[in-house]
Image (cartoon, helix red, strand yellow):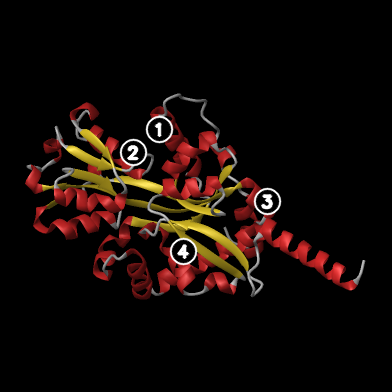
Amino acid sequence: MNKYSIAAAGALVIIAAAAVFGLQNSAGQAVIRVADPRALGWAPFAIAIDQKYFEAEGLRVKVVPVQTGDESLKALASGSVDVALAGIIPYSFIAFDSPSLKIVAQAVYAHDNQVVARRGSGIREPSHLRGKRIGYAKTTASDIGIKQFLRNHGISEDEVTLVQLKPLAMPAALASGQIDAYSAWEPHIYNGQKLLGQDAVVFDDAASTYTWHAAVIADESYVHAHQDELVRFVRAWKRAEVFMQEHPEQARAVVSRETKIPEETLAAIWPKYGFGIGLPDDLATTLATDLAWANAQRTASSTLPLPADRVDRSVWDAYVKASGTR
């Protein structure tokens, strides 16, 4: 084999390796493709990008924007991304059919899934929703949120018409009269209030608010092959959480730019969120509850998987061992 043949063979090996792994960019950084719903719950992710914490860890994050956690997980299941940022509710639906998708860490809990209604539809209180059309995003916190809302207020699902919509479409659908109310999370609650002005009614009491949890999720094959990169991903995320605590105004400015929620509004709703990546003791309870609810919504129910079987502790345990923290 001459030197040109050897060079060509070597080039083919390099190209093949790049095609198979796709892990390094021209600067030698590991590339992680992340499906991001661009919501307030993912504030640390936005800040880690803005402050270049991922770059400091030798990572280049390629953001794939999505509207919901359900879309995020579908992108993960299809292989379009390496990591999905998603609520545990949508994860609980896909967990039955895609058992290889694992929760790497819980990232946030939020008390912000609420119902926005239109006064012009004759709605002033929850009971006025009877006979009305309510927008919701199936298999998300919006889904379980509206059903909990109806149950808490003594309204049967048969007494309303549930209309499936994308969250971004909900405010306009409400303003145009296509629906009379919708169930969603921030910034979609704020956007509806802003669009409707005085015609908006927001039910935000405890009985009307659903608390959802969200996580960082990846396929177990990716987790095992790229544990080091994911540990660095978690470390960058943790640095972003510290930044949020130490520089709240700067943090809100970054999140405002990403979510389009004004900073003064963020200041008011920020306390609804509990940021803290990790594997909390109550994760198993949260996951068991959400899996049971998701199973009840499925056409054909299945045996509930054990919560421990849907969590991969390896990344978090490696992070704890390396950092000496819990």
Lateral position of residue 73 relative to residue 186, left or right: right
Relative to residue 127, is residue 212 depicted above or below? below
Q: What element carries label 2?
A: helix
Q: Residues within 10 Å of mark 2 (few under 14, many from 20)?
A: many
Chain-order first, disc 2 or disc 4? 4
Res. 203 visible in picture: no
Chain-order first, disc 3 or disc 2? 2
Q: Nearer the viewer, residue 299 or 17?
A: 17
Name the kind of residue labelled 2 in the image: Ile
Q: Distance between the residues labelled 1 and 3?
A: 30 Å
Kindly identify the residue that appears in the image at 46 percent across and 58 percent down.
Answer: 276
As drawn, the label of residue 224 is 3
Q: How crowded is mark 4: few (under 14 residues within 10 Å), some or many (20 or more)?
A: many
Q: How far apart are marks 1 and 4 (CA)?
A: 28 Å
Q: Position of residue 211 (x, y in %)?
A: 34, 46
Quarter of the image that includes the C terminus? bottom right
Name the kind of residue labelled 1 in the image: Trp
Res. 270 visible in picture: yes
* Residue, disc 2: 144
* Residue, disc 4: 45
Chain-order first, disc 1 or disc 3? 3
Q: Residues within 10 Å of mark 3 (few under 14, many from 20)?
A: few
Kindly identify the residue that appears in the image at 20 percent across and 53 percent down.
Answer: 172
* Residue, disc 1: 293
Q: Nearer the viewer, residue 256 or 170?
A: 170
Q: What element carries label 4?
A: helix
Q: Distance between the residues labelled 3 and 2?
A: 32 Å
- How many marks on residues? 4
Chain-order first, disc 2 or disc 1? 2
Decide: marks 3, 2 in contact (CB < 8 A)?
A: no
Q: Is mark 1 on a helix, strand or loop?
A: helix
Q: Position of residue 209 (x, y in %)?
A: 27, 45
